[in-house]
């Protein structure tokens, strides 16, 4: 049987090379599949923002009806998030993530049957129920494989899927909605829901085949590599709080993290659900052109996510690497209202805003995972994610209500900008000794 190499006695370059090669192997094996799953997840979650461009007219929905329907997804998500993540911790990621993906693919495709406001609300709620547990489940899963000083970059790479879904989803949704109306009697937005549900179903089946629950199950790792990863993860876990579910729910750090995440998610889904509408308001009318333009902020955001996370890992500093992008995102949202009638300047401001918002997200998750472990991590991460994602309900509904009230999205952008500033300030309230690892 293989034993751990004596890394302390080995030359520094040899020890460093072994560690780097081991984690590179894990990254290559796990990350592409999880990344594609999150692309499909986020696309199925926010493609309703493109459907809105046609669906509101076809179904005679108001902006408030759309905002409520877009946001009610997160009510179902909230109610089932914690139980879903606790189940994942007990039964394993492979079966549970596959279950999540297959059920949300089926529900997302069934959006084709929406023909009334109540039906719209019901399907969005069920989509939230189906998807509950995916994102926090992956964040928890990564703690089984990577220590804290590597998770910033890994989480950032995983979460660039949000940006890539915008890069791919915008042009794809625009093309589908422009070219397929009337085919087989379906509207363009109906075809969009059907076609974009297919990858989720296929990836759910792929998870069953290719994902392993724990390091010890990975036949593609050598015994020495398994022992090394397990030792690093175990040594880190020993320093963390295990805790019970009750202790987790009463931990003020968990509630502070939830409020911080709520503030950032306000910005994320404000942009995610309303970006096509904001671009259209600058004077762009063609739905495919709107799709192409919407890809730009997400493409720049993907680069920002990786660069900021890499810099944070190198310097082992988290708080300012979260707060500064939040402040930049807030400034971008405000500038987008100042130049709301100029497509070039508005797109520049929206790109800055989106890059700032996206850069906060992966590094935010380095905060709670720095002090939670085991059942406490499963419950705590899920609780933070579910409470934070209630902003996904509040944000689109508030913007829709404000747009119906004022006939402008500007006041909604001001609300989101204030929320990002609040999140940045609260992040700096986290003790540096707790999260800078």
Image (tube, grey):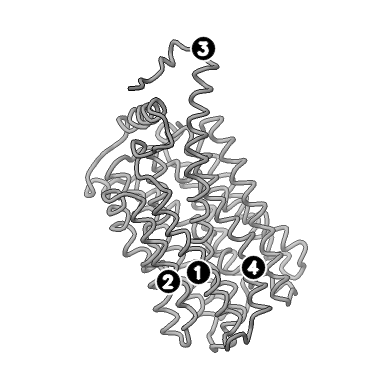
Expressed as whole percent of the image width and height from the top left, the position of residue 206 reads 45, 55
Expressed as whole percent of the image width and height from the top left, the position of residue 114 reads 47, 83
Nearest to N terminus: mark 4 or mark 2: 2
Q: Which residue is mark 1?
A: 197
Q: Is residue 240 left or right of residue 120?
A: left
Where disc 1 sits, the SS reads helix
Q: Which residue is mark 4?
A: 172
Can you say whether 327 is above or below 274 in the image? above
Q: Is residue 54 left or right of residue 130?
A: right
Expressed as whole percent of the image width and height from the top left, the position of residue 62 reads 54, 84
Q: Could you classify mark 2 by the number of other residues whose Cα lies within 10 Å: few (under 14), some (14-19), or many (20 or more)?
A: some
Q: Could you classify mark 4 by the number of other residues whose Cα lies within 10 Å: few (under 14), some (14-19), or many (20 or more)?
A: some
Q: Which residue is mark 2?
A: 106
Q: Which residue is mark 3?
A: 11
Where disc 3 sits, the SS reads loop
In-front residue for pair 415/359: 359
| Residue plotted at (45% across, 85% down) | 117
Asked if marks 2 and 1 touch (Cβ < 8 Å), the reply is yes
Whole-number angstrom distance, CA of label 4 to CA of label 3: 51 Å
């Amino acid at each position: 049987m293989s034993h751990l190499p004596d890394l302390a006695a080995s030359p520094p370059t040899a020890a460093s090379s072994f560690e780097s090669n081991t984690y590179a192997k894990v990254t290559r094996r796990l990350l592409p599949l999880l990344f594609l799953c999150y692309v499909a997840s986020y696309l199925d979650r926010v493609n309703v923002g493109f459907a809105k461009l046609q669906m509101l007219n076809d179904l005679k929905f108001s902006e408030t009806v759309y905002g409520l329907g877009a946001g009610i997804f997160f009510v179902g998500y909230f109610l089932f998030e914690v139980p879903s993540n606790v189940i994942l911790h007990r039964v394993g990621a492979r079966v549970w993530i596959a279950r999540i993906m297959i059920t949300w693919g089926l529900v997302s495709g069934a959006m084709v049957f929406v023909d009334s406001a109540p039906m719209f609300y019901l399907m969005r709620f069920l989509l939230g129920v189906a998807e509950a547990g995916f994102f926090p489940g992956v964040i928890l899963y990564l703690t089984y494989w990577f220590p804290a000083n590597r998770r910033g970059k890994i989480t950032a790479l995983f979460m660039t899927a949000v940006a890539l879904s915008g890069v791919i989803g915008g042009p794809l949704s625009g093309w589908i909605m422009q070219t397929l109306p009337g085919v087989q009697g379906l509207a363009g937005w109906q075809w969009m829901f059907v076609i974009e549900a297919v990858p989720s179903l296929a990836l759910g089946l792929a998870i069953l085949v290719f994902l392993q629950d724990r390091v010890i199950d990975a036949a593609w790792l050598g015994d020495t590599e398994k022992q090394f990863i397990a030792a690093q993860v175990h040594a880190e876990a020993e320093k963390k709080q295990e805790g019970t579910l009750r202790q987790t729910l009463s931990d003020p750090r968990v509630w502070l993290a939830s409020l911080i995440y709520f503030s950032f998610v306000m910005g994320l889904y404000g942009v995610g659900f309303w970006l096509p509408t904001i671009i259209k308001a600058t004077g762009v009318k063609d739905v495919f052109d709107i799709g192409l333009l919407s890809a730009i902020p997400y493409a720049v955001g993907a680069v920002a996510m990786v660069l900021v996370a890499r810099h944070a890992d190198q310097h082992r500093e988290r708080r300012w690497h979260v707060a500064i992008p939040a402040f930049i995102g807030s400034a971008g949202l405000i500038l987008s209202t100042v130049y709301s009638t100029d497509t070039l300047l508005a797109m520049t401001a929206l790109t800055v805003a989106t890059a700032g918002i996206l850069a906060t997200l992966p590094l935010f998750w380095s905060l709670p995972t720095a002090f939670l472990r085991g059942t406490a991590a499963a419950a705590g991460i899920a609780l933070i994610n579910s409470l934070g994602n209630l902003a996904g309900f509040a944000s689109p509904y508030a913007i829709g209500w404000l747009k119906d009230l004022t006939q402008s999205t500007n006041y909604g952008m001001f609300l989101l900008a204030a929320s990002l500033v609040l999140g940045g300030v609260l992040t700096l309230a986290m003790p540096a000794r707790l999260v800078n690892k």
